[in-house]
Image (spheres, rainbow, N blue to C red):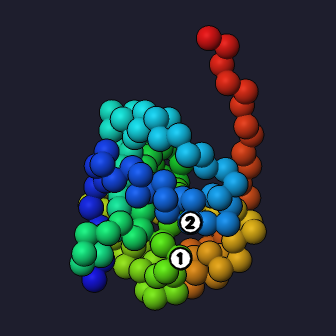
């Protein structure tokens, strides 16, 4: 059984380990913990921005996702839940943890008054694409990203 809860600062190293336990994360995450702790602290100060972890019966962090609630005017002022950084430990992939996770996502989104759950995923993640469409997500939009240079300080 997996229990989902709000992450604490002490959970950040385990979350980073889940990000690295991924073919894309291996190349883009770094070993230095300080930037991740600073980002976690910033997230804690932002209303509607939550880092959620899933822990197994032994208390090990085996899954994570970031949930952000967004109010907007489009779609008749639909409030939405944005999901990012979805990860399940490689040892448990394909064993139903993702289904449990998205049941948790939906419960939290409904409680926050959301009528839409949205997410983005890297296009090379074929397994993730199959999973998301299998649980009812539709690929309705094309996403774009633009990396910005760091600000001059």
Residue 73 versus residue 103 in the image, above or below: above
- Within 10 Å of disc 1 (Cα), the crowding (few <14, some 14-19, many 20+) is few
Place of residue 44 in the rendered image (x, y in percent of width and height, measured from the top left) = 33, 38
Tag shown at residue 108: none
Residue 40 in sight here? yes
Secondary element at image label 1: helix
Residue sitting at x 48%, y 72%: 89
Q: Nearer the viewer, residue 11 or 50?
A: 11
Residue at the extreme top: 153
Picture quadrant where residue 21 is located: bottom right
Mark 2 vs mark 1, CA separation in Å: 7 Å
Residue sitting at x 54%, y 59%: 19
* 36 to the left or right of 149: left
Residue at the extreme bottom: 95
Q: Which residue is mark 1?
A: 90
Q: Nearer the viewer, residue 69 or 62?
A: 62
Q: Tell me whether circle 2 and circle 1 mark residues in contact (CB < 8 Å).
A: yes
Picture quadrant where residue 37 is located: top left
């Amino acid at each position: 059984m997996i229990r989902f809860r709000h992450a604490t600062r002490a959970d950040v190293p385990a979350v980073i380990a889940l990000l690295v336990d991924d073919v894309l994360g291996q190349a883009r995450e770094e070993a230095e913990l300080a930037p991740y702790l600073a980002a976690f602290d910033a997230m804690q100060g932002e209303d509607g921005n939550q880092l959620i972890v899933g822990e197994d019966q032994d208390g090990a962090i085996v899954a994570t996702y970031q949930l952000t609630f967004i109010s907007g005017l489009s779609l008749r002022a639909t409030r939405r839940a944005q999901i990012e950084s979805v990860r399940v430990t490689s040892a448990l992939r394909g064993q139903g943890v993702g289904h449990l996770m998205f049941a948790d996502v939906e419960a939290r989104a409904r409680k926050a008054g959301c009528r839409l759950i949205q997410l983005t995923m890297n296009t090379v993640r074929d397994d993730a694409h199959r999973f998301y469409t299998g649980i009812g997500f539709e690929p309705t939009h094309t996403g774009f990203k633009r990396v910005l240079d760091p600000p001059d300080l």
